[in-house]
Amino acid sequence: MTDTRTALGPLERAGDIWVVGDSGRSDGSWLEFRAEGLYRRASDGDGELIPWSRIMLGIGVYIGRGHPRTGQYTLAGMLGNLPGPFRGRGGGHLDMTLRHPYEDRKLTFDRHARPYPLLDTFLLEELLSQIVAADETPRLGDPDGLTRAVGRLTQLSPRMTRRRLSAAVEEAWRG
């Protein structure tokens, strides 16, 4: 079901949509970027659609359960990147603030067996946050536009400064 050749951390193309998390697990949870909004698919099979217009103030990406003290990875999230018994275990979540009604949300997903490079996770959070800050969230529901942006971002070097990476992310999604 998924094409892992086009991925940015936990974000990958799955057929005609982009998903965050391992959508290949029948009992898993993941988040789908649809034209009408962000669809949360829970491990029990339930779903919830959050319209793009409700998302505000950026989106945080965290790997591992809970919140890390600093950065985007908890200890379990880091262990899930290493070879061995922890590889691909656990999950992560997107943190966001929604409007109408105002509420903070933590949307969880199951992680893939593959590791998530630190740069990819940083770029994903930067991409999501920039698009939300520019009030362009419907762009996340455009699979072709997101494919172009992710294709540009996967070519970036981890040796670039944070400022240059942020500028490259903006250039990638504005296209």
Image: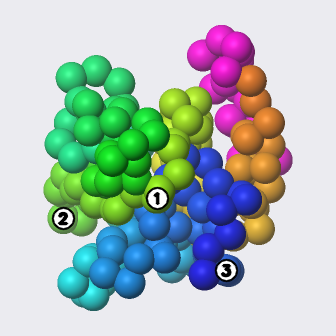
The answer to which image quadrant residue 44 occupies is: bottom left
Q: Is residue 116 left or right of residue 139?
A: left
Q: Which mark is residue 101?
A: 2
Q: Amino acid at mark 1?
A: His
Label 2 crowding class (10 Å Cα cut-off): few <14, some 14-19, many 20+?
few
Of the pair 4 and 41, the residue shown nearer to us: 4
Q: In this rendering, is residue 162 above or below 60? A: above
Query: Which residue shows up at 28% across the image and 21% down it?
Result: 70
Can you give x and y, in whole percent of width and height, for residue 150 in the image?
A: 71, 50
Element class at badge 1: loop
| Left or right: 172 in relation to 16 | right
Crowding near pointer 1: few (<14 within 10 Å), some, many (20+)? many
- The residue that appears at 39% across and 43% down in the rendered structure is 84
In front: label 2 or label 1: 1
**Earlier along the polypeptide chain: callout 1 or callout 3?**
3
Label for residue 15?
3
Quadrant where the N terminus sits is bottom right
- Residue at image mark 1: 112
- Magenta segment range? 158-175
Comes first in the chain, label 2 or label 3:
3
**Label located before the other in sequence (2 or 1):** 2
Can residue 73 be seen in this snapshot?
yes
